[in-house]
Amino acid sequence: MENITNYQIVSVLLSGPYNKTFDYLVEKTKQAKVGQIVIVPFGKQELLGLIFERSKNKIKKEKLKKIKSIVNLPLISKPFLDFTEFFASWNCAYKGNVLKLMVSPFDKKSIQNLDYKNYKPIDEEKINIRGNFKKLNFYQKNASKEILNGFNKNSNCFLLDGVAGSGKTETYFEGVNHCLKNNKQVLILLPEIGLTSDWEERFKKTFGFKPLVWHSGITKSKKKKIWLSSLYNKKLVLVGARSALFLPFNNLGLIVVDEEHDLSFKQEEGIRYHARDMAIYLASKINIPIILSSATPSVETIFNVKLKKFSSLYLPSRATGSDLPEIQIIDMKENPTSSGNWLSDVMLKELLTRYKNNEQSLIFLNRRGYSPLTLCKNCGHRVQCNNCNSWLVEHKKEKIYLCHYCGYKKNVTGDCEGCNEAQLVSCGPGVEKIIEELSNHFPNAVIENFSSDTINKLDHFTESLKKIKSGKVDFIVGTQIIAKGYDIPNLNFVGIVDGDIGTYGGDLRSSEKCFQLLTQVSGRAGRHLKKKRGLVYLQTYNPESLVLKTIKEMNKDKFYEEELNFRKQASMPPFSRLISLIISSKYEKTLNEFSYNLFECAPKYKDVDILGPAPAPLNFVRGRYRNRFLVRSNKKIYLQNIVRDWISSIKLPRSIRLSIDVDPYNFM
Ligand code: ADP
Ligand code: ZN
């Protein structure tokens, strides 16, 4: 029998759906430390785990199992352990699942087999700055001075707020530069993987070396290398999508969240979280500055500036010296189009002028495919999805009807399934329809469809962007992905087909989203014009709406002020906290019974409102019925704990799925 006094007890967090840590024995001679990755026996299996803390329990050592092995890696640093704890608590997730995200390129086998002795960290010589920086203008200099001061203060959160093209990137590059000179790591989060190639190129031009890139399109073996670099290398620059937040950086000096308002920072599947919000917490834990950059900041961020939690750095004008575009509202009530057409005469006239003049134009419509609804003139039948209660969107080029929620598709035959008559008509436009309309007017023009249907692969994306930038394209017809941060040199006119899109749904953020999107799209026009301004035409039926008026007047402050007033009156975020519960089942009856039971045991607190259960606006998706609850409280209450207690007080039937969405952005 071994002498039990030669062992110490450690608490291990297991990778997987576990919230508690488990105690294990480890030989004292092995000098186990908090932050070490270990392999432990658990039931009949072995699991990957992390020594999370020294054990506080007084269990008899004889009862405990022994750790199988300690993986020989540098320690995961304390701020990341705190981050795991916080992340799980805030997002109502299991701590062990957060650990799983943190070690995502590895499983227990590959991490044990890691040949760490032969692992060569990236050569830091390669990360030496050899580039030449742009001479900053007055505003950029002031902003970067503030950022550099931020390195000497305790946790500092900046909003870098400036119109598109004001030189925000060049400004935060100063912060990156500072970190590199001090041998620190930098993390830059971008919303869209399509943006990284453009960004990489710019970075390379400025700094003279390539950053590490992390997103879902990176191979596993590359991810492993990058993961190890974040743990071994003292100095590096990593640009990535939201999941880069979970890399175990050992020497992080700065986080940048570029386009901080972008909705793709919100993870909507699996563990739901907002990468920007989590990044702010992480930066505060490590005591490093974080820069949120945007031309159209989120209302939450503006509110935090007002509360003086964040400092705002403002860049008022375009860095290239060109003026912001002129915005003209086209009232569609006064400029009607003939049936089945969507471009007004004024719009077409301007497009023609630009076309003759060899200038590029962007026609923007945030709707993929040909038409969002097909119905039968004879019997009224609508082409619908089998798995969801949604209309199928016609995609004419591929000759299919496609569900944008579940991917279900069927062929276009031309005949109605209800009455077999060939009397189907398409209602409303998608980008393909606009392209059709354009080709009728400009039969010889080169038209590029820039939407996620055509460029779902990174290669297509890069290719398409190259083609556009080369000037070979006359008309770009695009959805919201074209609105994101691209610099298209010869683009001087933007036509917005439907300025009212998205404002009908009436969710909490519809005005905000519309304001951001239209401002971003408009910002693409005339970025490199000298002495002349770009031009934007905005077609609408509601020229008097707050969004359109403030965009036309370029009065951003007014928009935020009125929007904040509205939220305050309605007691909505950022003045309150929301949590959504989404409950789904294949069986409608089970779903409704369970929803009712859950309602019956809902907690009754002063200042906590529980709305629901109600069928979700999309109450049937991927073959499952869905109900929703919305829980609201003031911000002094830690609502997550209340919701957790509530959920754990009731047993979940097997056929029910329940997901908790903290600070929800999606209300469908
Ligand atoms: P933002 O990030 O605010 O959209 P960028 O940093 O992309 O703006 O800058 C827009 C354009 O202005 C880029 O082409 C960039 O190279 C250029 N630019 C930025 N700063 C300067 C400067 N100080 N002088 C000249 N050009 C600049
Ligand atoms: Zn569907």
Image (cartoon, rainbow, N blue to C red):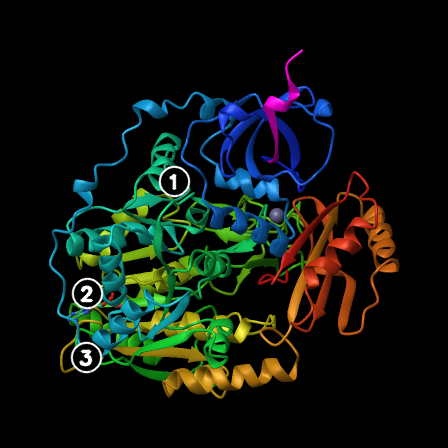
Q: Nearer the viewer, mark 1 or mark 3?
A: 3
- Residue 138's disc is 3
Which of 520/413 is in front? 520
Residue 46 appears in the rendering: no
In the rendered image, which residue does mark 2 sit on? 489
Mark 3 Cβ inside 8 Å of ligand 1: no
Q: Within 10 Å of the Cα at label 3, are there few (<14), some (14-19), or many (20+) other Cα atoms?
A: few
User: In this orientation, which residue lies closer to the viewer: 283 or 372?
Assistant: 283
Q: Is 282 included in the stretch rendered in magenta?
A: no
Q: Which residues are magenta?
A: 1-12
User: Is residue 172 placed above or below 561 in the rendered structure?
Assistant: above
Please tell me whether mark 3 sits on a helix, a strand or a loop. Answer: helix
42 sits left or right of 352 in the view: right
Amino acid at pointer 3: Phe
- Name the quadrant containing residue 496: bottom left
Q: Amino acid at mark 1?
A: Gly
Q: Is residue 8 magenta?
A: yes
